[in-house]
Image (cartoon, coloured by chain):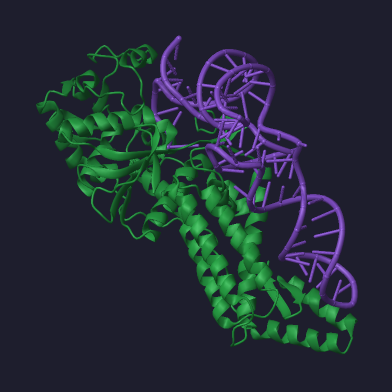
Amino acid sequence: MKIYNTLTRSKEEFIPLEPGKVKIYACGPTVYNFIHIGNARPICVFDTLRRYFEYRGYDVTFVQNFTDIDDKLINKANEEGITVKEVAQRYIGEYLTDTQGLGIRPADIHPRATDNIDTIIEMVQSLEEKGYAYAVNGSVYFRSRKFKEYGKLSHQPLEDLESGARIDVSDVKEDALDFVLWKAAKPGEPSWTSPWGEGRPGWHIECSAMIRKHLGETIDIHCGGQDLIFPHHENEIAQSECCTGVEYVRYWMHNGYINVDNRKMSKSLNNFFTTRDVANQYGYEPIKFMMLQAHYRSPINYSIEVIEQCQAALDRLNNCRDNLDFALKNACDTATDGEDAFKQGIDARVGQFVEAMDDDLNTADGIASLFEMARDINTFMAETRSKDAVSYAISRFDELCGVLGLLYNRKTEDLDSEVEALIEQRQVARKAKDFALSDKIRDQLTEMGIVLKDTPQGVQWSRK
RNA sequence: GGCGCCAUAGCCAAGCGGUAAGGCAGAGGUCUGCAAAACCUUUAUCCCCCGGUCCGAUUCCGGGUGGCGCCUCCA
């Protein structure tokens, strides 16, 4: 499998640290608000990455943090007159609701910054002892320049980073490039006791600490949005590599943005749509589909039109799956003509899928092969086929949907007897050419949310 | 100023040296008592423009034009 590594700016063959195992860390949300669909992109994409590695037989450990202490949390708590902890608790809950809706599997571990203060302090202390950090007035800063490779991820010459540095050149810092590891507490803020006095962790150190604690000194893949490359990931590398002396991350993966009117969607530009709001109107699944129908590094321009197109595309996949269920009900026991060739064709689609996904997780191409498989299936299932052939198609179709994380919300409940009886009555009426009655029954079922399709093999129904 | 990214049909979107995947919408057709749905087929003489390299470029190189991002909290 090839992965585009931000560190080398090239696609590289993925070689795990330990054969058969992959350690992945994804930067999680700062839990001070509902997530917007820009936040939802890495969540969807890297969940699929995880699934794909598992599909390919890897033993995956997937860790995603919650940043639950931060200026934004503190502000939110003050605004609402509740504690920071309550803010965090609330939005972690909302986050889990949204991710569940998106069909995202929970990470193996969801560490929280505030549960890892000890490790954070240990790391900061270690950096201080090694001369990479210095304390001023109860805060601790990292000496960026002392790390020779500072800038290797963002590929920025240090001078240019510096000239780009903003006004906040607090005089307490030795150098504008330095960043904070530990912040001295201001009155009224949540704080923890440390060797430097009461304070709280800076933003960057938490990820370094949680990775070290839960995954070890070196991990295979670290992922997140492109906007995290600098300074967040750059700083993580500096802290961790100075602390441990070994390589921090082998492969860095960064997803592109969701745009609105071609501008980056962000909370600060206030042009964002929350995942919840979009989901309330269109459902979660079209959002998921939208994330996967483009390559993860390409920008996606969000619009209502796009979401509606995704919905329609998803309908096609769902119809194919409905067709398969129906075909299974009507399946015969012995093989019909062309079933071997059909199965081989299906296998070839799976092959295409794997090839696409192996190429830097090209989900757009992967989805294309799913659609081609759907066409193969629809065509072949136009006639009655054997149970064996239908079951095979179902398992391979579901296999790809499972890897992508699509069609996770299919309703499988059976009809209740009342509905079944009505469908049967309608069929009797139709045979007797009593179309007035049959249409009346159809209308009745429509009102109950049951949609009928009359096919050569019988009546196919679905819920709308 | 530094460092990057993008430009493919009405829309979304892959491909990236050998002559344009897939989806939506549109058109035609099949099925059907009708309808709906579904399904099938079809839809880019060519990939922003100008040069260059090559037997051959949407794909590589150079130069434009137009968008965007990071360098500051941000997925």
Tell me which residue sits at (34%, 32%) in the image: A7
> Do we see residue A30 in this rendering?
no
Tell me: residue A263, above or below residue A65. Answer: above
Foreground residue, A303 or A437? Answer: A303
When the figure is inspected, residue B33 is found, relative to residue B21, above or below; the finding is below
Q: Colour of chain B?
A: purple
**In the image: residue A46, left or right of residue A110:** right
Left/right placement of residue B1 relative to residue B48 reads left
Where in the figure is residue A205, as x and y percent of width and height? 26, 34
Query: Which quarter of the rendering shows the C terminus of chain A?
Result: bottom right
Asked where in the image residue A67 lies, by quadrant, the reply is top left
Residue A233: image location, x then y, percent: 33, 32
Residue at 33% of width from left, 29% of height from top?
A: A153
Foreground pick, A211 / B30: B30
Q: Is residue A374 left or right of residue A3?
A: right
**Which one of the lettered chains is coloured green?**
A
| Residue A280 seen in the current view | yes
